Image (cartoon, rainbow, N blue to C red):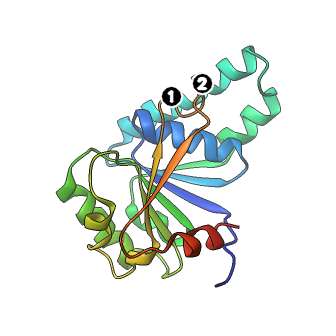
Amino acid sequence: MEKMNLQTVTVIGAGTMGNGIAHVFALAGFDVNLIDIKQEFLDRGLATIKKNLDRQVAKQTIAQKDADSALKKISPSLNLETAQDSQLVVEAASEDAALKRELFAKLDQICPAETILASNTSSISITEIAAATKRADKVVGMHFFNPVPVMTLVEVIRGLELPTKRLIQSWH
Protein backbone atom coordinates (compact mmCIF):
# COMPACT_ATOMS: atom_id res chain seq x y z
CA MET A 1 0.00 0.00 0.00
CA GLU A 2 1.23 3.48 -0.82
CA LYS A 3 1.65 5.99 1.97
CA MET A 4 -0.86 8.81 2.04
CA ASN A 5 0.37 12.31 1.31
CA LEU A 6 -2.10 14.23 3.43
CA GLN A 7 -2.31 17.87 2.36
CA THR A 8 -6.01 18.77 2.21
CA VAL A 9 -8.68 17.86 4.73
CA THR A 10 -12.37 18.55 4.33
CA VAL A 11 -14.53 18.93 7.41
CA ILE A 12 -18.28 18.67 6.91
CA GLY A 13 -20.21 20.62 9.52
CA ALA A 14 -19.11 23.93 11.04
CA GLY A 15 -20.82 23.39 14.40
CA THR A 16 -19.10 22.79 17.73
CA MET A 17 -17.21 19.68 16.71
CA GLY A 18 -16.63 20.59 13.05
CA ASN A 19 -15.15 24.00 13.71
CA GLY A 20 -12.89 22.51 16.37
CA ILE A 21 -11.71 19.80 13.97
CA ALA A 22 -11.08 22.38 11.23
CA HIS A 23 -9.19 24.52 13.78
CA VAL A 24 -6.75 21.78 14.77
CA PHE A 25 -6.09 20.56 11.23
CA ALA A 26 -5.44 24.14 10.02
CA LEU A 27 -3.22 24.88 13.00
CA ALA A 28 -1.27 21.70 12.16
CA GLY A 29 -0.60 23.16 8.70
CA PHE A 30 -3.16 21.38 6.53
CA ASP A 31 -5.36 23.12 3.99
CA VAL A 32 -8.92 22.74 5.24
CA ASN A 33 -12.22 22.94 3.39
CA LEU A 34 -15.01 23.65 5.87
CA ILE A 35 -18.40 22.74 4.40
CA ASP A 36 -21.87 23.40 5.76
CA ILE A 37 -25.39 23.82 4.38
CA LYS A 38 -25.91 27.51 5.29
CA GLN A 39 -23.64 30.54 5.14
CA GLU A 40 -24.70 31.57 8.64
CA PHE A 41 -23.40 28.23 9.98
CA LEU A 42 -20.05 28.77 8.23
CA ASP A 43 -19.84 32.36 9.51
CA ARG A 44 -20.56 31.25 13.07
CA GLY A 45 -18.02 28.41 12.82
CA LEU A 46 -15.29 30.68 11.45
CA ALA A 47 -16.00 33.26 14.16
CA THR A 48 -15.63 30.55 16.80
CA ILE A 49 -12.36 29.38 15.29
CA LYS A 50 -11.01 32.95 15.30
CA LYS A 51 -12.12 33.45 18.92
CA ASN A 52 -10.46 30.19 19.99
CA LEU A 53 -7.24 30.99 18.13
CA ASP A 54 -7.22 34.45 19.76
CA ARG A 55 -7.62 32.74 23.14
CA GLN A 56 -4.63 30.51 22.38
CA VAL A 57 -2.56 33.56 21.42
CA ALA A 58 -3.59 35.36 24.63
CA LYS A 59 -2.56 32.32 26.67
CA GLN A 60 0.71 32.23 24.70
CA THR A 61 0.17 28.62 23.61
CA ILE A 62 0.57 29.71 19.96
CA ALA A 63 2.06 32.74 18.22
CA GLN A 64 -0.09 35.30 16.42
CA LYS A 65 1.53 34.36 13.10
CA ASP A 66 0.43 30.75 13.62
CA ALA A 67 -3.15 31.83 14.34
CA ASP A 68 -3.18 34.05 11.25
CA SER A 69 -1.74 31.25 9.12
CA ALA A 70 -4.32 28.74 10.42
CA LEU A 71 -7.21 31.07 9.55
CA LYS A 72 -5.86 31.52 6.02
CA LYS A 73 -5.74 27.73 5.56
CA ILE A 74 -9.52 27.36 6.09
CA SER A 75 -11.72 27.70 3.00
CA PRO A 76 -15.45 27.81 3.75
CA SER A 77 -17.88 26.30 1.22
CA LEU A 78 -21.55 25.51 0.78
CA ASN A 79 -20.76 22.92 -1.89
CA LEU A 80 -20.06 19.27 -1.04
CA GLU A 81 -18.12 18.99 -4.33
CA THR A 82 -15.36 21.00 -2.62
CA ALA A 83 -14.30 17.73 -0.97
CA GLN A 84 -13.13 16.29 -4.30
CA ASP A 85 -9.46 17.21 -3.84
CA SER A 86 -9.12 16.04 -0.24
CA GLN A 87 -7.15 13.08 0.97
CA LEU A 88 -9.21 12.96 4.18
CA VAL A 89 -12.83 13.96 4.77
CA VAL A 90 -14.11 14.21 8.34
CA GLU A 91 -17.88 14.36 8.69
CA ALA A 92 -19.16 16.18 11.77
CA ALA A 93 -22.83 16.60 10.85
CA SER A 94 -25.86 15.91 13.03
CA GLU A 95 -26.15 12.49 14.71
CA ASP A 96 -28.64 11.17 12.18
CA ALA A 97 -27.85 7.78 10.64
CA ALA A 98 -29.84 8.43 7.45
CA LEU A 99 -28.11 11.80 6.94
CA LYS A 100 -24.69 10.23 7.44
CA ARG A 101 -25.41 7.37 5.01
CA GLU A 102 -26.59 9.92 2.42
CA LEU A 103 -23.49 12.09 2.91
CA PHE A 104 -21.11 9.13 2.67
CA ALA A 105 -22.81 7.83 -0.49
CA LYS A 106 -22.35 11.27 -2.07
CA LEU A 107 -18.75 11.56 -0.86
CA ASP A 108 -18.03 8.13 -2.30
CA GLN A 109 -19.00 9.51 -5.72
CA ILE A 110 -17.25 12.88 -5.32
CA CYS A 111 -13.89 11.88 -3.82
CA PRO A 112 -11.08 9.85 -5.40
CA ALA A 113 -10.99 6.17 -4.44
CA GLU A 114 -7.96 6.68 -2.18
CA THR A 115 -9.64 9.36 -0.04
CA ILE A 116 -10.28 8.25 3.53
CA LEU A 117 -13.79 9.08 4.71
CA ALA A 118 -14.20 9.56 8.45
CA SER A 119 -17.15 10.23 10.71
CA ASN A 120 -16.95 11.98 14.07
CA THR A 121 -19.95 9.98 15.30
CA SER A 122 -19.86 8.51 18.76
CA SER A 123 -23.06 6.51 18.51
CA ILE A 124 -23.66 5.31 14.93
CA SER A 125 -22.03 2.14 13.59
CA ILE A 126 -19.04 2.84 11.34
CA THR A 127 -19.80 -0.41 9.51
CA GLU A 128 -23.33 0.87 8.81
CA ILE A 129 -21.98 4.18 7.49
CA ALA A 130 -19.31 2.42 5.41
CA ALA A 131 -21.98 0.23 3.79
CA ALA A 132 -23.26 3.34 1.98
CA THR A 133 -19.97 3.46 0.04
CA LYS A 134 -17.98 1.27 -2.31
CA ARG A 135 -14.89 1.77 -0.12
CA ALA A 136 -15.77 0.25 3.23
CA ASP A 137 -12.05 -0.38 3.76
CA LYS A 138 -11.44 3.39 3.71
CA VAL A 139 -14.21 4.48 6.09
CA VAL A 140 -13.34 5.08 9.74
CA GLY A 141 -14.65 6.74 12.82
CA MET A 142 -12.55 9.65 14.07
CA HIS A 143 -14.14 10.60 17.35
CA PHE A 144 -12.65 13.85 18.57
CA PHE A 145 -13.25 14.95 22.13
CA ASN A 146 -14.75 18.32 23.00
CA PRO A 147 -13.41 20.97 23.04
CA VAL A 148 -11.30 19.73 20.14
CA PRO A 149 -8.56 22.42 20.33
CA VAL A 150 -8.03 21.62 24.04
CA MET A 151 -8.50 17.84 24.19
CA THR A 152 -5.50 16.37 22.37
CA LEU A 153 -7.12 13.00 21.90
CA VAL A 154 -8.87 11.33 18.99
CA GLU A 155 -10.32 7.85 18.94
CA VAL A 156 -10.03 6.01 15.62
CA ILE A 157 -12.62 3.31 15.05
CA ARG A 158 -12.53 0.85 12.20
CA GLY A 159 -15.50 -0.84 10.62
CA LEU A 160 -15.67 -4.57 10.02
CA GLU A 161 -14.09 -4.25 6.55
CA LEU A 162 -10.95 -2.39 7.62
CA PRO A 163 -7.96 -4.33 8.95
CA THR A 164 -6.21 -2.24 11.60
CA LYS A 165 -2.75 -2.80 10.08
CA ARG A 166 -3.89 -1.39 6.71
CA LEU A 167 -5.32 1.76 8.34
CA ILE A 168 -2.15 2.43 10.34
CA GLN A 169 0.08 1.87 7.31
CA SER A 170 -1.90 4.32 5.16
CA TRP A 171 -1.43 7.15 7.68
CA HIS A 172 2.34 6.83 8.10
- As shown in the figure, which amino acid type bears the numbered disc 2? Asn
Gap in Å between the C-alphas at discs 1 and 2?
A: 10 Å
Q: Which residue is mark 2?
A: 52
Task: Please give left or right for residue 98 compared with residue 40 in the image.
Answer: left
Identity of the residue drawn at 58% across and 73% down: 165
Residue drawn at (65%, 73%) of the image: 169
Q: Quadrant of residue 107?
A: bottom left
Counting from the top left corner in percent of width and height, residue 163 is at: 48, 74
140 versus 121 height, above or below = below
Image vertical order of residue 151 relative to residue 126, above or below: above
Q: Nearer the viewer, residue 31 or 157?
A: 157
Q: Position of residue 76 (x, y in %)?
A: 50, 48
Q: Secondary structure at mark 1?
A: loop
Q: For the point 39% across and 59% down, which residue is it?
A: 79
Q: Which mark is residue 135?
A: none
- Say which residue appears at 51% left-offset and 57% top-offset: 10
Per the rendering, the mark at residue 147 is 1
Look at label 1 and name its amino acid: Pro
Q: Quadrant of residue 150?
A: top right
Farthest residue, direction top? 58
